[in-house]
């Protein structure tokens, strides 16, 4: 009986700790004023972009103590106050068109370093979480390489969360995630999707245009789900600016009216 009681107590403690460690979201924690956290700066392995003289170095801050506690109890990444993936290495995979995805990430910034001069600069000057990164894939054929030389370096695409839009005191992929385009030197950062929306999908149309599906919190519940309004935006990557909705509002209303019998 004593052994059984001890096992029950141990299971209860483990269950409590597991829920307490995994119940908080990942991302950049917005703590109360005056509260200090032990954070460690992390620089990941450099990213070398094709046809570019710049190397990219992802950066974030994490809490090594809380990360270790979370990992040992729940078997996952820290979910307390760290703002980036715990691993310094990552692999890319095919995303869309000629872009590769860096996968699920939680970077806080990107450092751009000129391989010739050694000069470095930051992409962002404010708190944020880079939730997704789409990088131009290396050209394989000679024809593609010649095309890249004639058109110049291609832009990278970044999904960035900048505000705690759902009110949980964290900035992460559950908030509004806006799509940005940036030059290989980290300059000309341009927003491609409207404020208050979340990127839900990207489809390439050749090398010069993309279609972006975004969700708008139309029911004002602080979350982005399939219950929210979806918009399709067309973005011209040759001249980056906020995408234009297609179809237009008149067609959207007509499509709805047909089904509603109006």
Image (tube, rainbow, N blue to C red):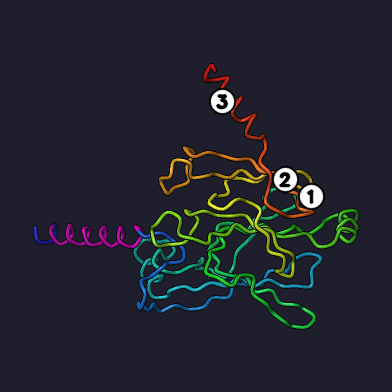
Which labelled disc corresponds to residue 256? 3
> Which residue lies under the disc numbered 2?
204
Rendering quarter of residue 149: bottom right
Which labelled disc corresponds to residue 108? none
Count of number-bearing discs: 3
**Rendered view: 197 above or below 39:** above
Residue located 63% across and 59% down the image: 158
Disc nearer the start of the sequence (1/3): 1
> Which residue lies under the disc numbered 1?
207
Rendering quarter of residue 46: bottom right
Q: Secondary structure at mark 2?
A: strand
Mark 1 or mark 3, which is nearer to you?
3
**Rendered view: 174 above or below 111:** above
- Mark 1 and mark 3: span between their CA atoms? 33 Å
Mark 3 or mark 2, which is nearer to you?
3
How far across and how far down the image is residue 167, in percent?
39, 57
CB atoms of marks 1 and 3 within 8 Å: no
> Is residue 261 on the magenta stretch?
no
- Which range is magenta? 5-23
Residue located 41% across and 70% down the image: 67
Mark 2 surroundings: few (<14), some (14-19) or many (≥20) residues within 10 A: some
CB atoms of marks 1 and 2 within 8 Å: yes
């Amino acid at each position: 009986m004593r052994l059984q009681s001890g096992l029950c107590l141990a299971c209860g403690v483990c269950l409590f700790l597991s829920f307490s460690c995994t119940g908080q979201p990942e991302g950049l924690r917005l703590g109360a004023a005056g509260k200090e956290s032990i954070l460690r700066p992390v620089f990941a392995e450099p990213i070398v972009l094709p046809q570019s003289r710049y190397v990219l170095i992802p950066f974030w801050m994490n809490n090594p103590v809380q990360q270790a506690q979370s990992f040992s109890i729940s078997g996952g990444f820290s979910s307390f106050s760290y703002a980036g993936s715990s691993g310094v290495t990552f692999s890319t995979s095919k995303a869309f068109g000629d872009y590769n995805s860096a996968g699920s990430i939680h970077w806080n910034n990107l450092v751009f370093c000129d391989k010739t001069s050694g000069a470095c600069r930051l992409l962002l000057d404010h708190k944020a979480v880079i939730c997704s990164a789409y990088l131009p894939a290396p050209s394989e054929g000679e024809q593609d390489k010649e095309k890249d030389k004639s058109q110049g370096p291609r832009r990278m695409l970044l999904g960035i969360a900048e505000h705690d839009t759902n009110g949980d005191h964290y900035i992460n992929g559950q908030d509004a995630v806006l799509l940005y385009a940036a030059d290989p030197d980290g300059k000309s950062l341009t927003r491609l999707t409207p404020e208050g929306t979340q990127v839900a999908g990207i489809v390439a149309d050749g090398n010069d245009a993309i279609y972006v599906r975004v969700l708008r919190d139309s029911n004002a519940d602080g979350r982005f789900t399939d219950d929210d309004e979806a918009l399709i935006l067309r973005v011209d990557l040759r001249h980056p600016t906020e995408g234009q909705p297609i179809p237009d509002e008149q067609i959207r209303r007509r499509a709805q009216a047909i089904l509603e019998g109006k």
